[in-house]
Image (cartoon, grey):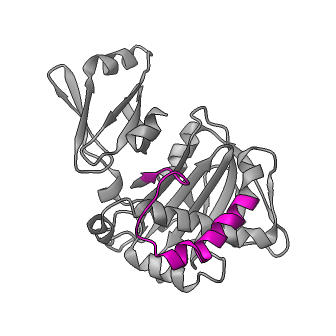
Amino acid sequence: MGIGAPLQQTVKNVCAACNNGWMSGLENHAKRVLTSLLLGESDEIRADDQGPVAMWLQKTAFMAMLLSSAEDREAGYGVPPSEYRLLYEQRNTFEPLGTSRFWVGRYVGELGHGSVWVTPLSVGVAGHPESDLPDGYSMTIVLGALLLHGVRFTHLPFPVDLATRHLLGDLWPAALDAGASVAGEITEDQFFALARGRAFVVSDENVTLRPWRPATELEESSLIGSMIEMPTLCGKHVAYYPADLFFEAQQGRFYWFMTGCECGIGYLIHTEHDGAHTKAAETPEQIGA
C-alpha cells in the first residue's frame, strides 16, 4: 500500500517535456477546479471538468508511487509499471484510463491533512483461484475539505459493477452534461476504510473485491519486554512504542505519537482499543509540521 502527500513531494522520474507540458496543463486545470472545493466553498464539478479531475487523481497517485522502489512496483505493490505508459499514451484526452470509476465527497475528519493512498486490490470469483498479482488498485486523495476516491481494474476479462459503502457523488464516468456534486460527509474512520480498499460493495454475489493481502495485511505486533514491536507499512521494518500506551488504551486513554523506519518514512500513530493504528505516513518533516 502506498501513502504520500500530494503537492508536497517531488519525484525525479518525469522528463522535462512531460513535466512542463501535459502534466503542467493537468495541474493547472485541477487547481482551477479544485481550489474552491478543498476550501469547502463549492460542491459542484462541471461535466467538462470531470475527466480532467479524475485523470489528475490518477496521475497524482502514479507520482506518489514513484517514491517506492521499482522492485516493489514490479512485485505488485502500488501501480503496475505499464500504467504509466498507458496514461502517457492518452495524455491528450484529459480522461483517466479505461475500466476506472471515481467518486467525490466532503471530508469532515478531525485530522486535517492532505494525503494520497494507493491500495492494490484483488478480485475473487467463486470457484476460481486468486491471482498472484493484484487485479487493480484504489486511489484516494484528501485535500482540505475535498475527498476523491477511485478504482482502476488493470487486466480483468469481465466488468465489475461496484459502489462504495459510504455516500459519495459520482465523478467518472461522467453523466452527459450533468456535472458532479460533492456528496456525503466522510469522517476520519470512513476515510481510512476507503483508502485501505475496504469500503467497496460489489453487486455480483459471486465476486469479491478486497485489498491484496501481501501489500495490506501486516504481521501482528509483539510484546518485547516493556516495548511493543509493530510492523511498519513499508513491509520491511518494525517500529517500537512503550507497552504502557497499549495498556492505557484498554482503559480508554488514547495517545498520538510519531515514529519512523529505516526507509526514511515517518508514521503518525494513534492508539485505540485494539492496538496502535497508522493514521498517516509521510516524510518525518511533514508528519511533524
Residue at 50% from the left image edge and 75% from the top image edge: 16
Q: Quadrant of residue 77?
A: bottom left
x and y, in percent, of residue 128 in the image = 35, 74
From the viewer's perspective, tell me whether residue 93 is left or right of residue 255.
right
The reply to whether residue 279 is visible in this rendering is no
If the image is split into quadrants, where does the N terminus sit?
bottom left
| Near-viewer residue (21 or 219) | 21
Residue at 41% from the left image edge and 25% from the top image edge: 273
Any magenta on residue 146? no
The reply to whether residue 245 is visible in this rendering is yes
The span picked out in magenta is 3-32
Any magenta on residue 24? yes
x and y, in percent, of residue 40 in the image = 76, 44
| Near-viewer residue (59 or 188) | 59
Q: In which quarter of the image is residue 237?
A: top left
Residue at 58% from the left image edge and 84% from the top image edge: 90
| Near-viewer residue (194 or 12) | 12
